[in-house]
Image: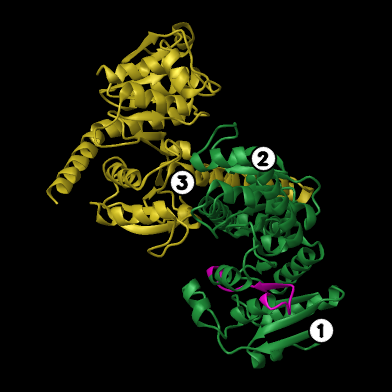
Chain colours: A green, B yellow
Amino acid sequence: MKIAIDAMGGDHAPKEIVLGAMDAVKQIANLQITLFGDEEKISQYLTDKERIQIVHTDEVITGEDEPVRAVRRKKNSSMVKMAEEVKDGRADACISAGNTGALMSAGLFVVGRIPGIDRPALSPTLPTLDGTGFLMLDVGANVDAKPNHLLQYAIMGSVYAEKVRSIKNPRVGLLNVGTEDGKGNELTKKAFDLMKKAPINFVGNVEARDLLNGVADVVVTDGFSGNIALKTIEGTASSLFSMLKETLMSSLKTKLAAGMVKSDLKGLKDKLDYSEYGGAALFGLAAPVIKAHGSSNRRAIYSAIKQTCNMVEQRMIGTIKETVETMQQGKGED
Amino acid sequence: MKIAIDAMGGDHAPKEIVLGAMDAVKQIANLQITLFGDEEKISQYLTDKERIQIVHTDEVITGEDEPVRAVRRKKNSSMVKMAEEVKDGRADACISAGNTGALMSAGLFVVGRIPGIDRPALSPTLPTLDGTGFLMLDVGANVDAKPNHLLQYAIMGSVYAEKVRSIKNPRVGLLNVGTEDGKGNELTKKAFDLMKKAPINFVGNVEARDLLNGVADVVVTDGFSGNIALKTIEGTASSLFSMLKETLMSSLKTKLAAGMVKSDLKGLKDKLDYSEYGGAALFGLAAPVIKAHGSSNRRAIYSAIKQTCNMVEQRMIGTIKETVETMQQGKGED
């Protein structure tokens, strides 16, 4: 199994990327990694070259670059070269912690789509209180989704949850403004009807207030609402933790108490740390393309590589292709 | 000033509604209240009838009722009778803690719209870390919004923030998937252009992760996304507090520490309690119609009454009317 990795993307590149890659080859048998980026900088940290090779590139797509233009113009960037490695069949999948929009463009224009899937979906696994986590898609790849796109997200998410996360008969929910059938806007009402007939375990509408309680294993939504939900979870959690910190630092008494529960509170924060769940997959592309979090450290990169290897080993793309083909044949026969 | 109140709506009706009403007439000069509901039940708690009268009604719209049908069929319900009181000019405004959908229907079909406003918006004031709070609209009255609806929300929200919340030159933001100009879906891109030209202090796109940091005084969004954002804030906060509680109760040591900071943590929770900010106004109707939280206690009802009185005193509806008329005249002259 060969994974291509953009060594120049993310806040802690290339150091944490290289360290994570070295951890991965130690843990995962038969894994070969190709790192794309500045050879000199990468070599500083690459103390063990077993099953890891470097392809030197001299351009970098930054967070400030306009995604589509960057992918078109920076032909020799680490991210574009990484995507070409997959397109040309020299790698099975790729990972970048860089510019999310640019990775979506590189995925779409370089790697290409699965036939029958109209739009790729950005799909992170988010934490739940019980530690299981749930997959939410789309969180921003496609902000003007049609009902049929949501149906495709449901199928891809269900295949991923079953094959890669090993959840038997995963519960697929539709993010909506109420739980009753018939609730929602034009988009979700139509998507509901399509999802009801799909070969998935559709549990109906789910509400945003129940997301962290694990109301579904896969939550389907359009890229606009999904992005709002994701960033609201992040913002609310971060605001609450900073308020908690302020409260606990407000007096000698609270500081004393804080000292006693410090490690417990750290554990609470870790529970909500979704770097543990790997990166956000871009579903709908002809090969696994994974967006690791921009602030990824060595551990998050390792998790993303492990997740990517699972997607390759479990033939996730093949299963999505076959499911979509079967559905289209079924339609043709109607 | 006369306020009509549905005494039968909400989890703690009629007791907490009646107690809150008695508190309000004590604090607010010239306030007269008419309570709608079961006279016998209301009388149990109404120990001081000064400036409070009861209008007996023998039907109640429950949380399970289908909103539009309930308003059409339960003609003698406390909520419909309350709305008629406003429509017929016997009250200046009305408040209910009952079925949100039914109150929106009663507002729309009984009280009626302001000329020039296409759709009412449900507009709660939500907490920020600094305690100022921000107005978000719409959070679910209209789940298929058009760009022009968002423009109208922006104007109504700005008038409310300035007149009722006394914020000078309130910052109006558009909830979006990124802060840069040109970001978003078709709806927000078009709404952005309209809001840029409106007579408001438009601060551009704002992201969901910055909401609790007070990134804007008024946050405009469609009813679907707004509902998702609101319920995600509620769900995330409630999940975190239950995780925190669990963590603090996990051992003797943490229990000891928890005892030391109990009142401080209570203060933190209170900071996020938006009953302090009054109810959610339904903007765009011919008179103030206020939805108090379903779990409203005496204090929340008092806050909602105070807020409603402010809306009446500050001639909020009149100002919205005049602003919309001026904008329409400006358009006609183009």
Question: As drawn, is A277 to the left or to the right of A253?
Answer: right
Q: Are marks 2 and 3 in contact (CB under 8 Å)?
A: no
Residue A222: give x, y in percent of width and height.
55, 51
User: Quadrant of the rendered structure where residue A44 is?
Assistant: bottom right
Q: Which residue is mark 1?
A: A51
Residue at point 77% right, 84% down? A52
Give residue B127's mark.
3
Question: As drawn, is A254 to the left or to the right of A298?
Answer: left
Residue A22: give x, y in percent of width and height.
78, 80
In this rendering, the label closer to the viewer, 2 or 3: 2
Q: Is residue B9 above or below residue A187?
A: above
Looking at the rendered structure, the secondary structure element under dot 3 is loop
- The question of residue B203 being in magenta is answered with no
Foreground pick, A197 / B153: A197
Residue at point 41% right, 47% down? B221
Residue A60: give x, y in percent of width and height.
55, 83
Gap between marks 1 and 2, in whole Å? 51 Å
Gap between marks 1 and 3, in whole Å? 53 Å
Chain where mark 2 sits: A
- The reply to the same-chain question for discs 1 and 2 is yes
Looking at the rendered structure, the secondary structure element under dot 1 is loop
In this rendering, the label closer to the viewer, 1 or 3: 1
Magenta stretch, residue numbers: A87-101
Give residue A334's mark.
2
Gap between marks 2 and 3, in whole Å? 53 Å
